[in-house]
Amino acid sequence: MITIYAVSDSIGETAELVSVASSCQFNEDINVIRTPYIKTFDDVEDFIKNIKIKQDCIVISTIVLSDVREFLIQRCIENNITIINILSPIINVLSSKLHKTPVYSPGAVWKMDEDYFKRIEAMEFALQYDDSKDLRGLKNADIILVGLSRTSKTPLSLYLANKGYKTINIPLVPEIPVPDELFSIDKKKIFGLTINPLNLIDIRKHRMDKFSLPHIEFSYSNEERILEELEYSDKVMRKLGCKTIDVTSRALEDTALIISKYLNF
Amino acid sequence: MITIYAVSDSIGETAELVSVASSCQFNEDINVIRTPYIKTFDDVEDFIKNIKIKQDCIVISTIVLSDVREFLIQRCIENNITIINILSPIINVLSSKLHKTPVYSPGAVWKMDEDYFKRIEAMEFALQYDDSKDLRGLKNADIILVGLSRTSKTPLSLYLANKGYKTINIPLVPEIPVPDELFSIDKKKIFGLTINPLNLIDIRKHRMDKFSLPHIEFSYSNEERILEELEYSDKVMRKLGCKTIDVTSRALEDTALIISKYLNF
């Protein structure tokens, strides 16, 4: 089996994502090992020493410390290990366009700056206002998700929070009227999540089986009930005049991208 | 100002991360524009047409569709635009090592596979069991975070959930005994978050000001009270025999990495 070492002088998140994205282009077991904090010549030596079968591995490096990066390249060549540098070609182009030397600061992308604290705040916000227990957040939210149960509102709001967007989600249930406040919010911020009925029935049945909920007493996955709910949800979304997104077979990342493009974030 | 176009035939998350990580190496305003779903020759033509000032931009591409990728390179060269391909050098090396052709599937890394649904489940788990309102999740958690108020337990548990780890967090408050169940859990799964006292005082004062909480009546940011809380927290962590992590000035990503390395995830 081939092993990719995702090597970084910081936490290695970029190196890992690039390695995984590349290995997903093969239907093969490819082992990606994240190797963070390679910051000194000694770290490089230890790393090279610990690689077992050198011909079956690739090193993907995002090291920005230039002397460490060059030393790693040298040691890989001496050991006949394929190495690919990710950031340095881009940094070199930027450097020549800007006529500036890079700062050579490992992990500069993970610094605890304004954006970082915005993310932390958004995560706390998402948690505080999940499932509309408290509507005071409505006017401070960047994004409001509305949809029936099991249309991925909660994971989507946490994913968006992780990206720094204050997100609130309002479940649609025929028996519980949507809060009036929703109609006074800028409708550009509201997103209605829709789903294919067959898909929703499947998801809910699966969930009931998992939690061993009694099938008979419960209308949750009853097909007639689901169609009724979907009709209700369509009606509310039309009334709100919000953008709707069909989440059937759509990954969170994809739905989140549609939302952020729409909002020009 | 220089603009980096992070171009992808999928959602563009990898291209964007690589672009941002590179631009963070300069103390300059560099504009990163994510340009997802470039999947056809027409998409490439539209993209090239829309670039305004061509000499001040760089194209970072993670396109895997080989004909689209090559066409983009050709059009960039014709227009004198610098282009750097991220994934293709790695895919080529893997291809020759595996003696296999890549699948050329855009967004393969974002597919809704087992890992994806594990992440969704972990996010729902984190939300359900946040702040120990309900302890039934304790035995199913991958990670248990304990710490005083404002030691980043909640954002950290959401970040870990986003990575697919079921995380639960237990706040430490001198007046409320920790649940007995905690002492019967494998202590390798428990992580105690510690923090520098001065830092904690600062964070809490800042929070009180933000929410205009009355300074006098409240012991939350009182220095003596905080020292007492820290002493209590140390005692509990020693009793639990868990690993402790000092979160003072440490970014979430970094703390999460320490945890996942420790658990060999």
Image (tube, coloured by chain):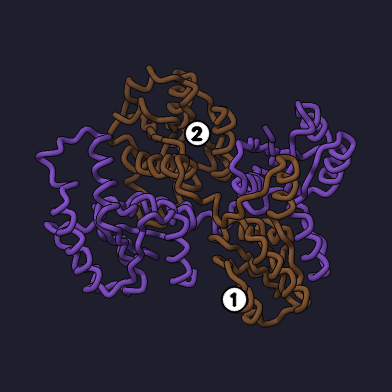
Chain colours: A brown, B purple
Q: Is residue A22 above or below residue B52?
A: below
- Camera-side residue: A167 or B138? A167
Q: Is residue A71 above or below residue A105?
A: below
The residue identified by callout 2 is A193
- In x, y percent, where is residue A71? 69, 70
Q: In the shown orientation, is residue A214 left or right of residue B262?
A: left
* Image quarter (top left, top right, bottom left or bottom right) of the N terminus of chain B: top right
Residue at x-position 14% and y-position 58%: B176
Work out whether residue A64 or residue B121 is closer to the camera in this orientation and state it: A64
Q: Is residue A228 visible from the viewing direction of this image?
A: no
Q: Amino acid at mark 1?
A: Asp
Residue picked out by circle 1? A42
Q: Residues within 10 Å of mark 1 (few under 14, many from 20)?
A: few
The local secondary structure at tag 2 comes to strand
User: Could you tell me if residue A243 is visible in this image?
Assistant: yes
Q: Is residue B235 left or right of residue A147?
A: left
* Subunit ID for the residue under disc 1: A
Determine the image quadrant of residue A154: top left
Task: Classify A12 as above or below A163.
Answer: below
